[in-house]
Image (tube, coloured by chain):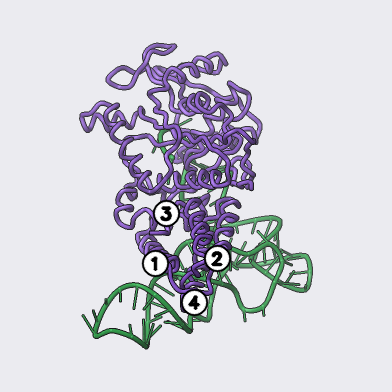
Chain colours: A purple, B green
Amino acid sequence: MDLLLRDTFSARAVPVPHRARRPLTLYVCGPTVYDGAHVGHARTYLFFDLVRRHLEAEGIPVRHVMNVTNFEDKIDARAAELGLSWRDLALREEAGFLRDLHALRILPPHYRPRASDYVPQMTEVVRRLAKTGRVRRQGAEWLYTPPVRPRGVNFATAADLAAHAVREPGHPFPLGDGAAGEFLVWKLQDPPRPSWEGPWGRGTPGWHLECYAMANDILGLPVDIHGGGTDLIFPHHYAENEIALALDRRPFAKIFVHPGLVLWDGSKMSKSRGNLVPLRTALREVGPDALRWYLLGSPLTERFHWSPEGLRRAAGEWAHLRRTLQGWLRPGAAGRVGRLRAREVADGVRLDLTADLATDRVYDHLRALSVAIEADPSGHLPRGERSATLAAIRDVERRTGLRIRP
RNA sequence: GCCAAGGUGGCAGAAUGGUUAAUGCGGCGGACUGCAGAUCCGCUUCCUGGGGGUUCGAUUCCCUCCCUUGGCUCCA
């Protein structure tokens, strides 16, 4: 059955494209590794984890790429603070980041390319962009100016930025001197900062080129599904898409999906605001299952309001639910809640995930099962129905990543 | 200012034209228990942002206003 996902570009739920005998390609923008993962990262990668789990459970093979941005100004700044090289800091933070995602039981991507290993490919993109004649020099930087495109060709933001670029005091746009939508292609830079030989001397390629180069090299463009947090839509996904449009005359991806950001105290969780919760802290507090249960509780494409109270309640509910189900699955006397019920639950879960990963509705099936078990005084599975029920529960576990059985 | 996504009870969140608007959490009361925890049972009146419109009937469709959040070159 086709998985429906809400495509950011068309703003509607569309079937995930795939062809028989060809794996579906999934490219997810990974982290810049200068610091640890927080629960906002967790929810984003959890979203793509569910996409992948569901597709694989439906028998569709997936090639999943998550890049690691391991050179960038912020890494340099942090490395200088700590007296480390950018490479060492990035390696250390990457390891910690991946360890935390793994602890949340997020399936490891099949490919995890590091930006620094793709500089030749990025440099090639620089050359190809230069040939378009749309790259101009500004001091030590080279910038690409995308053509003005009709609405609907790239994300609306860009067209509107171009159309409504007004310089007004007190408003953040535009910050630079350049045209709307312009982005960095190459910047001159010397060691110890990350630098390589390029078309205009020693320097470093622009961030937006990274995902284009990697996705093109590893998966081939356009990829079937591309995404990241909604804060990446502009400028990052806009710019990647511009590169693809300029060099290939077609978009970067068939569909773009953007899980909603995690907010706390009414604003986006981010380091600069100092309102973030490290993933490790949350995991230590309630464990991977309860944290998953909490984060999956609201529709993944919508923003998520984090609160310690919410986490505590979700953890309590999960513990209760899991205890109930485990008691029921234990071999024992026959009860009225049998195979049919578990099969119904598994089918309901499957259908709800298919319709735009409606994890919040998945809750209802598990809650209903739990309530039905509690309403049954004997509360155990008939002996003959154990294996079918266990299979149904296993299916739910596989699709949601929640671990119900002991 | 422009673009985008949202606004349902204390919280999370169902339900897209039709009886008293699910469900769970939380809260309160009770059973059980030496106490606590766990578990179970019961209760939880008051909730669809405001205003218009369409309709026999609107959470649902249309218009408008208000509010919140994100983005506007570091962002998951």
Please tell me the numbered disc located at residue A339: 2
Residue appearing at x 38%, y 48% in the figure = A104
Give SS at disc 4: helix
Q: Along the polypeptide, which appears first: circle 3 or circle 2?
A: 3
Looking at the picture, do discs 1 and 3 lie on one chain?
yes
**Disc 1 sits on a residue from what chain?**
A
The residue type indicated by label 4 comes to Ala
Find the distance from the CA under tag 2 to the CA under tag 1. 19 Å
* Vertical position of residue A213 compared to residue A67: above or below: above
The residue wearing badge 4 is: A375
> Do dots 1 and 4 share one subunit?
yes
How far apart, in angstroms, are the residues tagged by discs 2 and 4? 16 Å
The x and y percentages for residue A135 are 51, 17
> Mark 2 is on which residue type?
Arg
Quickly name the residue at label 3: A292
Q: Quadrant of residue A341?
A: bottom right
